[in-house]
Amino acid sequence: MPEVIGELSGIRKNVIEQLKGLYDLSVPYGQIVTNELAEKLAVLTCQISREIAVYLNRHGQITSVSVGDQRTVSLPEINGRRAKHRLSGIRCLHTHPGGNSLLSAVDVSTLKEMHFDLMVAIGAADSSVTSLSMGFITEIVDDKEQFEQMGPLTLQDMTAIDFGYLLSIIERRLSLSTKTHSLQEEERAILVGIERKGSWDVEDSLNELEELAITAGASVVGRFWQKRDKPDSALFIGRGKVQEISLAKQELEANLVILDDELSPAQQRNLEQLLGIKVVDRTGLILDIFAQRARTHEGKLQVELAQLRYVLPRLGGQGLVLSRLGGGIGTRGPGETKLEVDRRHIRSRISELEREIKCVKKQRLLHREQREKNNLATVSLVGYTNAGKSTLLNALTQADVLAEDKLFATLDPTTRKIELPSGREVLLTDTVGFIQKLPHQLVAAFQATLEEVTEADLLLHVIDASHPLYEQQSDAVWQVLKELHCETKPAITLFNKIDKIAESESITRMTRLSGSIALSVLHPDQDEGLAPLLKLIDEHLPLHWISCLLKIPYDASAKLAQLYELAKVKNVDYQDQGILVKVSLPSEYFERYNQYVVEMDTCQRG
């Protein structure tokens, strides 16, 4: 039987029954309070002129109802996980007769003593809600709890706040302050996917999703999938499968569900409400990894822009508590300071980021123009994430770029100069790795970086030949290249990691097409090393330069002055009959000097 505790003397029996009726109410996952609960508390408070407190667990169920002020109410025993460095898992909602919702000193001391998730005060006057305020612990310094108060807020504002998101921020900030005790539990994830015709095998796709989850810092404790022609519009998966996952999450002690596709904002909210735990889709997971890996100012700008574009339609009231201090997967960001903004401010921030990235694009354009002025051709490394692009760049240029056996180990592009067997110098650029279902927000936000691909003279497609799905991974890369309108660019294919392949027939099959080569970047052939790859690049790089020997008459010596501006002049010999000039000419200017050619160096592609 539900029980009302506290000072009940003088309260009519029918009012006590109404107080007991509060136990029948619940608050949906992700909300702090509902309009119905707040308004009923205000009406009852005004009837009895006393404070009323209700205590809710994280499932939104009311566990206790008390009457009286905080000085006289004996707080119920909390069965949550209260400890010095952990929150209790209980939030307290209580009324303030008279309408002033600001937290009192007693409210604050109770919040600190009980380690409530939230202490919410509801101002009540004339049988209605006047305003609401809330407080929460932000950090523990020298065993003393520091707190923060928000409010007064309207009931509409309070119900719009995403409680799950706010709680993740609170626990993240607490974990950062305590260091020794992390309030953010280990993220134990359940993976969920659907099997559809014409897409990757669902098990293979979930295997890759597990790699992404591990890269982001979660441990995978279970996986579910179902066969569907198309995703459910409301829940992505069927309601029966949701119930199955809901039961399994308790047994597996999971606190995170990761979907293998991008969810609509409505699907994500519906799943969180039914499952009672955080739900992240594949896009949010990849964005989280990018947020962890971005190191340069440019990378952080691009990741933040992608995150804001992703989160804007999903706010659902989160704007009041949006922060770049995250609480685990799906909430991390590249910023260092707290950011509390609403939709209008987010749109303003997006505009600001777009302006900054335009400046980055201008800087990259200047660099490209300088390279073109120096007549340096460019080769861009493209490929699936973890195919070995950074390892290849290090092997060819000693660039010392971070190269790990992880997905998206490096984000920021790196450019280095290399010399080909012909003596020609070119620039080699390592770009961000691709992946199947690469979020459109990332492709759009990383335009400044991906322009290195669109402006390249030659693409070097690196494939992890040892991966069982290397063909599907290759298709995924070409799909992104099509989005960038780069599918017609000259390209050569490097099948990497062949030291992990036992069957020589497989290697022969891979390289049957022209413009392809198979080798191991980490363990190249002892005699030739990477020389065959450099030779292939030399052969396939478009001929921009023509090396030749010119004989320019003295009466046309102005042509020599032009050569110094347009070409690479290697040697000048003043003879009786004219000036002999050994030069490398850009192909577009060759016709101007064709009449002076004495000798062609057909081997030179410089």
Image (cartoon, grey):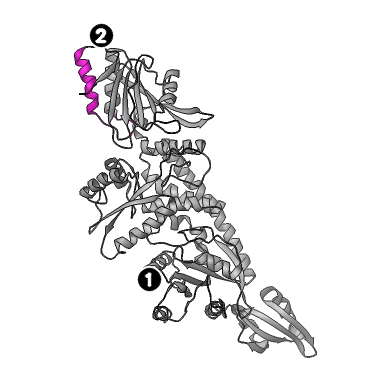
Residue 115: x and y in percent read 41, 28
Identify the mark nearer the N-term, 1 or 2. Answer: 2
The residue lying at 42 percent from left, 70 percent from top is: 466
The residue lying at 69 percent from left, 86 percent from top is: 550
User: Does residue 102 appear in this view?
Assistant: no
Give 492 or 399, whichever is nearer the viewer.
Answer: 399
* Tag 1 near tag 2, CB within 8 Å: no
Q: Name the residue under label 2.
A: 10
Query: Does residue 447 sit above or below 58 in this rendering?
Result: below
Q: Mark 1 points at which residue?
A: 471
Q: What stretch is highlighted in magenta?
A: 7-34
Is residue 400 shown in magenta? Answer: no
Is residue 28 shown in magenta? Answer: yes
Q: What element carries label 1?
A: helix
Q: Is mark 2 on a helix, strand or loop?
A: loop
Q: In this view, does 599 lie to the left or right of 17?
A: right
